[in-house]
Image: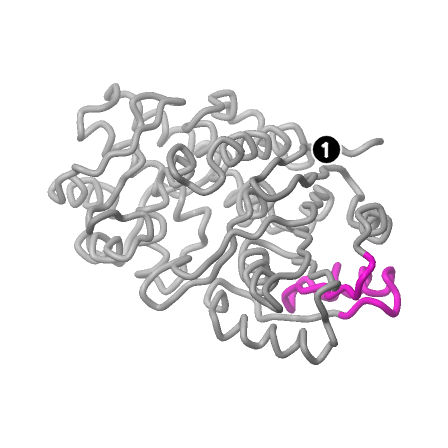
Amino acid sequence: MQPTEILVTSPTSKYPILIGDGLLKSLPALLEERKLTGKVAIVTNETLAPLYGEPLVQALGAKAVLVKMPDGEQYKTLDTVRALYDDFIAAGLDRRSVIVALGGGVVGDTVGFAAATYLRGVALVQIPTSLLAMVDSSVGGKVGVDLPQGKNLIGAFKQPEMVIVDPTVLDTLPDDEWRCGVAEIVKAGLIRDTALLDASLYRRGAIDYIVRAIAFKVNIVQEDPYEDNIRAYLNLGHTFAHALERVSNYGWKHGEAVAVGLLAAAQLSQVHGLCDPSLPFRVEQLLKTLKLPTRYRGYSAAELRAAMGTDKKRQANRIRFVLLRAPGDPVLVSDVPDSKVLSVLDSLRE
């Protein structure tokens, strides 16, 4: 069966997102088709290396090396990037080499940033292995790492040569990680494609909702490649989510934090007088049906609000929230009083 291909047009290049069962095994042929014939570094984490990294290196033969990085959001740092540079130099990677980011969002973002900056940029191939990375972080060319002061504060735009999405790798994905990806797809439904708000779509083994979610993000980033306007809508729920991740020292998984953030954004939309009062209830019921969290514990509203202070989307020291007038009708708002934000955060605290 032929893979589904979605062509992405960026300001600097065109590249395909290929979606299909079993595509991982086609990597050698796909590199040949794209004339990516230099030395290949397969970069993955310690968990995925024996599952997928080592077989790929064997399939590619002598021209490939395996590079491992630690597993977890806490390693999405400049220290990890520096270690990757050392590994690239030791492996003899040059300007013709290809770096393959094989993993979830942490791997894709960190390795992508290393590829963007090593030797002023070498070819990058993204192979996302989590649902969250497939539908979100591998699409759009944004790469970067965290600082102690906040998430994704260091980064670049780096377009890959291609993105390879093989849904069969989700067979080994734990249920909680799969639900993290579902949270990002619900976000897509709230921003534009309201058909994605149908809970019955989300069946493990299905592929249609993955293709639909990827197409949604591709359309957004093609309309606004450098986040000058509507691409900011993709941050729906993320100001809250990043704050929750930060105060928990990344104990909260990104997708689960996004779920709470989506409900917070819906409630703030209502409190700010933008949407019908039924919207927060509808969002909460959908999240609960999908077994996603809707409450947090252990932190005060004031702590979370303070953690928003370094959100990279702030402008002139004011936080820009993505809020909703209705499903499929987002709006950027920067005049939300702190009292409303704190009230919403308090209401979601167990």
Q: Residue at x 49, y 65 (%)?
A: 76
Q: Nearer the viewer, residue 340 or 140?
A: 140
Bounds of the magenta segment: 37-65
Q: Nearer the viewer, residue 245 or 112?
A: 112
Asked if residue 109 is positioned above or below residue 272 in the image, the reply reads below
Residue 335 left/right relative to 310: left
Query: Considering only vertical position in the picture, is 318 above or below 193?
Result: below
Q: Position of residue 132 (x, y in %)?
A: 55, 45
**What percent of the width, then of the height, locates residue 262?**
36, 37
Say which amino acid is labelled 1: Glu
Left or right, 280 with reference to 201: left
Q: Compare residues 91 and 204 and report the one nearer the observer.
A: 91
Q: Residues within 10 Å of mark 1 (few under 14, many from 20)?
A: some
Q: Is residue 76 left or right of residue 258?
A: right
- Quarter of the image holding residue 108? bottom right
Q: How is the image coloured?
A: one colour
Write the residue at 82% across / 51% down: 35
The residue drawn where x is 46% and y is 62% is 145
What secondary structure is found at the residue carrying circle 1? strand
Is 254 a magenta residue? no
Residue 206 vs residue 321: left or right?
Answer: right
For mark 1, what is the residue?
5
Picture coordinates of residue 65 (x, y %)?
77, 70
- Image quadrant of residue 165? top right
Q: Is residue 59 magenta?
A: yes
> In which image quadrant can residue 100 be found?
bottom right
Image quadrant holding the N terminus, namely: top right
